Image: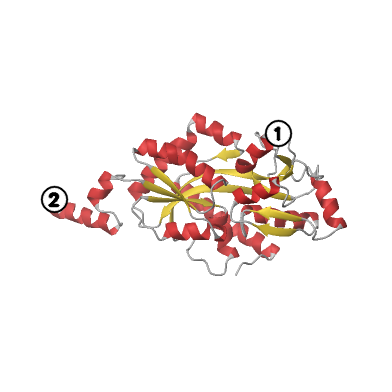
Amino acid sequence: MKPLHTLLGAATLALAALGLPAQAQDNWPAKPITYVVPFPPGGTTDTLARLIGQRLGQALGVTVVVENRPGAGGNIGSDYAAKAAPDGYTILGGTISSHAINASLYPKMPYDVVKSFAPITLIGTNANVLVVNAASPFKTVQDIVGAARAKPETLSYASAGNGTSQHLAGELFKELAGIKLTHVPYKGSGPAIQDVMAGQVPMMFDTTVVAAQHIDSGKLRALAVTSTRRIKSMPNVPTMAEAGVQGYDLQSWQAIFAPASTPKPVVDRLYREISAIIKSPDMQERLEKLGMEPSGMSPEQFAAFQKGEIAKWAKVVKTANIRID
């Protein structure tokens, strides 16, 4: 049997090899945590980061600072987080775009959507909703289809950026409805939806999390949701299939990651705290009102889910022939 001091020394070395000294790991968290959002303020990822970040900070007894680093469909902020120290003091709001779609959309990714990160949990999934300005002449999806067929490529739609779920929602609409629309990419949902409300762009698909407040305020008109079933928060809004676009099915998702090599005890603690927040009754109610289906998957379950999504969206990107150099 090996001496106790030898075993303790080996354990300390093992912890150091994971990137966090034993003492630091025991004291974690001892300083503020940065929650990176790879999109501008006002979008879905930002909204969720501020909701969850505040409660996470309370649970851990430290401040959680939300830091927006937008650009390149989520790639800039995600790359920043991927290269941060794997010490538990940086987490990332990842999405269907930054951690699934972009893998096949960009020929040269600055990070690996799987290998560069330690998955923590899936916050939830949500449908997108097709919206127009409240003063728009378009009252139904078929009004848009008719106008687009009468004058091809004269209508445009906004998105949160190239390769985002909003972008692919528009491409799927074009393909299934047999119409031509011009894509107008923005650097996030916030500025995109502002221009739709201002009448600068006729329409956009946006997540229910962002669009709901503007629909409720009367600034936007909801025409259809992108899921196969109507959602609880918008029971009177038809699905795209009900609106005449058969075979339409698209749901976005939001998740939380840490840099790869973040020690497992820290990842597990983050998962426990964040999962408890997501599964709390008041947060479940808040997320459902935003049109989200809450999740809280374990890191292992989420890793398997993510790999399936990468394969799924690779096929969609290939079929739509979308490429960003």
Residue 182 found in image quarter: bottom right
Q: From the top left corner, tell me how far across and down residue 63 is, in percent.
A: 37, 41
Residue 226 visible at all: no
Distance CA(mark 1)–CA(mark 2)? 64 Å
Q: Amino acid at mark 1?
A: Pro
Q: At x 22% / y 49%, what residue is drawn?
A: 23
Q: Amino acid at mark 2?
A: Leu
Report which residue position mark 2 lands on. 4
Report which residue position mark 1 lands on. 235
Q: From the top left corner, tell me how far across and down residue 73 is, in percent.
A: 57, 58
Q: From the top left corner, tell me how far across and down residue 61 is, in percent.
A: 34, 37
Q: Is residue 131 left or right of residue 123?
A: right
How many discs appear?
A: 2
Q: From the top left corner, tell me how far across and down residue 220 is, in percent.
A: 71, 41
Label 1: which secondary element: loop
Label 2: which secondary element: helix
Q: At x 55% / y 62%, what residue is drawn?
A: 103
Q: Is residue 127 left or right of residue 64?
A: right
